[in-house]
Amino acid sequence: MNFDILVNRKNTDCIKWDGLKEIYGKDDILPLWIADMDFESSPEIIDALINRSEHGVFGYPLISAKIFEPFIEWNKRRNGLNIDQEWILTCPGLVTGFTLGILAFTKEGDGVMIQTPVYPPFHSSVKNNNRILIENQLIEKEGYYTIDFEDFERKIRENNVKLFILCNPHNPVGRVWTLEELERMAEICLKYDVKIFSDEIHSDLILKGYKFKSILSLDEKYKKIIISAMAPSKTFNIAGLTASMVLIPDEDTRETYDKVRQSLSIGMLNIFGLTALEAAYRHGEQWLEEVMSYIEDNFDYMISFIKEEMPHVKCRKPEATYLGWLDFRNIYPKQDDLNDFLINKAKVALNSGLTFGKQGEGFVRINLGCPRSILEEALNRIRTAL
Ligand SMILES: Cc1ncc(COP(=O)(O)O)c(C=O)c1O
């Protein structure tokens, strides 16, 4: 694959490029924001979609076991996980997935805990459903984030927390939580009977030297409280096809969740999403290896550029995802000033750090799922403007 190729995404109804005016107030800026890649998806997925499309009949699909076989196989091979077919409940996207978790496992006024800074819909889904948002702030030291376990337990104990939404790997700080960290969190959650909804959407996007551990790999004793959610959307750049999976090993927990899913009639996926999901896990591994190697190089390029050309900006290479987390606090501690600088002077569209939580102030998230030339242009624009 040649990921240097610039695919023109303008006028394709894509929010990243076509939504700039609406989101940033102008469209003459270079977009490295929202989490989708500027690369074509794997040729096998594209072929499968063309074949399906040429059939010409697009009636109701049958969501059969066959569709999930490659996904189950994928997880066995790559993550050492034994996923049972019956654990899998489909839903369009993971935001829907964890929102259903909020509805299923909590009631209005209950506490739902997240680890900030974190993906903005973690905040909004809790608030929109009139639950109390509880923040276990991550501890940052030179760009490396760890968990404050004392605070984790205290917040659960004091705030009637019923659900913890975990982000693993973590967006935006890029951590792949270790087995020890997962076990420590699960131990506390088990003690207070808190369900863990683990958003594992980035779990295939692991950078060299790290190994993903799913919440599902924990001991049997945690079975009642764990829920994982995975999808091919980020992995294969098919987020617009909306086909995701929530995995719930415990039968009662699954039933509780599914009741809410059924009550809202969520679960039916569109045939293109299903076609892509099956093809992705069946044939997409080689493409994924290649794209991750390209992203790895993008990170190395960016980190050395920043070190040499704009040393007051701080950035640590993440352990996973194609998302970088840039610390501008030395130059622009106030988010408004930083956003104004990036949009109006540097003319790049990045994600404002403050939308991830208070500790995100003075940071921005940058998307490295793009051709090197776009990344180079963005970094040069920032350097020149600085
Ligand atoms: C952690 C996390 N969860 C969920 C999503 C979005 O999921 P979906 O588009 O499947 O709703 C994203 C997208 O960036 C994400 O980073």
Image (cartoon, rainbow, N blue to C red):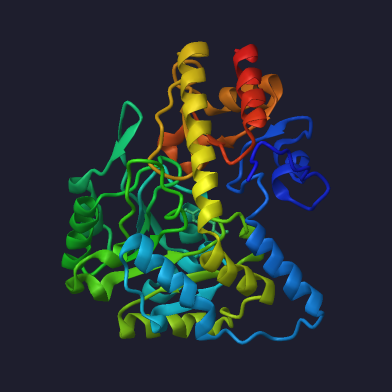
Residue drawn at (69%, 45%) of the image = 16
Residue drawn at (52%, 12%) of the image = 309
| Residue 164 showing in the rendered view | no
- Residue 362: horizontal and vertical position, in percent? 48, 27
Residue drawn at (54%, 73%) of the image = 91
| Residue 180 showing in the rendered view | yes
Look at the image and tell me in which quarter the C terminus lies. Answer: top right
Count of numbered tags: 0
Question: In this rendering, is residue 99 above or below 185?
Answer: below
Residue 338: name its quadrant.
Answer: top right
Residue drawn at (34%, 61%) of the image = 79
- Residue 308: horizontal and vertical position, in percent? 48, 12
Residue 175 falls left or right of residue 59 = left
Give the camera-side residue of 307 and 29: 307
Give the camera-side residue of 308 and 181: 308
Residue 26 falls left or right of residue 16 = right
Residue 210: name its quadrant.
Answer: top left
- Residue 129: horizontal and vertical position, in percent? 49, 65
- Residue 222: horizontal and vertical position, in percent? 21, 70
Question: In this rendering, is residue 296 above or below 213?
Answer: above
Give the camera-side residue of 89 and 278: 278
